[in-house]
Each structure stands twice: as structure tokens, then as C-alpha cells.
Image (cartoon, rainbow, N blue to C red):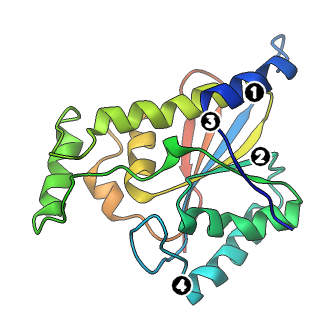
Amino acid sequence: MIEIRKTNGQENVIALSKNTSIETNRRVSLNFYVVRHCKALGQSPAAKLTDEGYKQAVRLAEWLSDKKIERIISSPYDRAIQSMIPLASQLAITVDTDLRLAERVLCAEDHPRWREMLRSSFLDLDLRYEGGESSRAAMMRAAAVVDELRSSGHANVVLATHGNLMTLLLKVYDRDRFGFEQWAALTNPDVFHLEFQEDLPVIRREWLD
């Protein structure tokens, strides 16, 4: 049985950090596996996985099963949660949700030039279209999740999210390497491994399907 536990982001993680600690007298490797969800039927928050997407979720769980995962935190969107359920079931842990991992909204309305608009938003991080969120704002909220978890006592964490937000989170740590072209090259699913031993992580793309 899988429990989907909603959190309030900062308040929940801070409470956790008071009860756990990381040894500070030696260098500890902290591993974040940032996962883009499996193939889905649409883009709405309620969009489910396709039949192929469910099969991908099982393969994803198999791939992550030996990574000593201690915690799974997901976007509250259905397709992200469903991508994590096989892994959570296999490890007998919960899927926590955090709104800060939800997909970045580019603009309020569907726009025929949305790809061009998205490209521009990677070049100008403060560009914000009507009803949307700037790249910088999205980067800050995603990075806040990682920053809080780095002091939580967990060494191996999965963050399940979406393509645009994933690319922006990676851009926080390597602005020259990640942008529109890297977003366009993502697959469903996709996995990037962030290994922290210092302030900036070593970033590796792990899912080569």
C-alpha cells in the first residue's frame, strides 16, 4: 500500500532536520536523483501516465532500486507521483509531495510561439510572461528544496519533477551547460544525478534510453 503524503515544504523539512543530522567531521556524499516523469497523456496536473509510461515507471524503479534511496519527493502532479509508485512500493517508503517541484508555468494561455518564448526565458532569467513564472523564480523554488534536504540527514533522495523545472534546477548549478537545447533533448523519463561533496554538485545524466 502506497501512502501519498502532502507536505508544506519548508515547515516539514525543517522539522525533520531538527531530529536528524549529518556528521560534519568528514566529507559526506549527498546524492539527488532528479527524475523527469514517465510518458503521460497530457500536460494538465491531473494527466495520467500512458500504458507505456506505467511500464517505464517499473523500469525506473528497477534502475533506482540499488541506489539506497531513503526518501522520494514528488511534484504533486499525477504523472510525477505515478512515476514514483513502483519504486516506493519496492522500497516500502512513502511518496511525499512538494508544490515547489511542480512544473513551471510559462504563460497563462496556450501560445503558438511557446517554444520561442521558452527559449527566450532561458536567455533572460527574469523574463515573465502574463500569468507565468520567470525562470529565476522557478530556479529559486526548486533549489530551495535541495538546500533544505542537504541538511536533513538523508544521503540519497529522489526528486520527481518535470522537464522545464528539471532543466532550470540543473541550471542553478551549471548555468553555461543547461538551457533550451538541453531541455529539448530530455526524454520521458530522464534522470540526472547530482552528487554533492562541496557547494556545487557533480552532475551526470544517468538515463540513456
Q: Which residue is mark 1?
A: 152
**Residue beneath the point at 54% across and 42% down:** 203
SS label for mark 3: loop
Q: In this picture, is 67 found above or below 135?
A: below
Q: Which residue is mark 3?
A: 8
Identify the residue at the far top of this view: 25
Alpha-carbon span between mark 3 and mark 4: 29 Å
Dot label at residue 195: none
Alpha-carbon span between mark 2 and mark 1: 11 Å
**Residue beneath the point at 49% across and 32% down:** 143
> Of 123 and 197, which appears nearest the observer?
123
Q: Earlier in the sequence, mark 2 or mark 3?
A: 3
**Residue beneath the point at 80% across and 54% down:** 94
Res 163 quadrant in image: bottom left
Alpha-carbon span between mark 3 and mark 1: 15 Å
Q: Which residue is mark 2?
A: 71
* Residue 21: x %, y % from top left: 84, 20
Alpha-carbon span between mark 2 and mark 3: 16 Å
Mark 2, Cα crowd under 10 Å, few <14 / some 14-19 / many 20+, is some
The reply to whether the C-beta atoms of the residues labelled 2 and 1 are less than 8 Å apart is: yes
Mark 3, Cα crowd under 10 Å, few <14 / some 14-19 / many 20+, is few
The reply to whether the C-beta atoms of the residues labelled 2 and 4 are less than 8 Å apart is: no
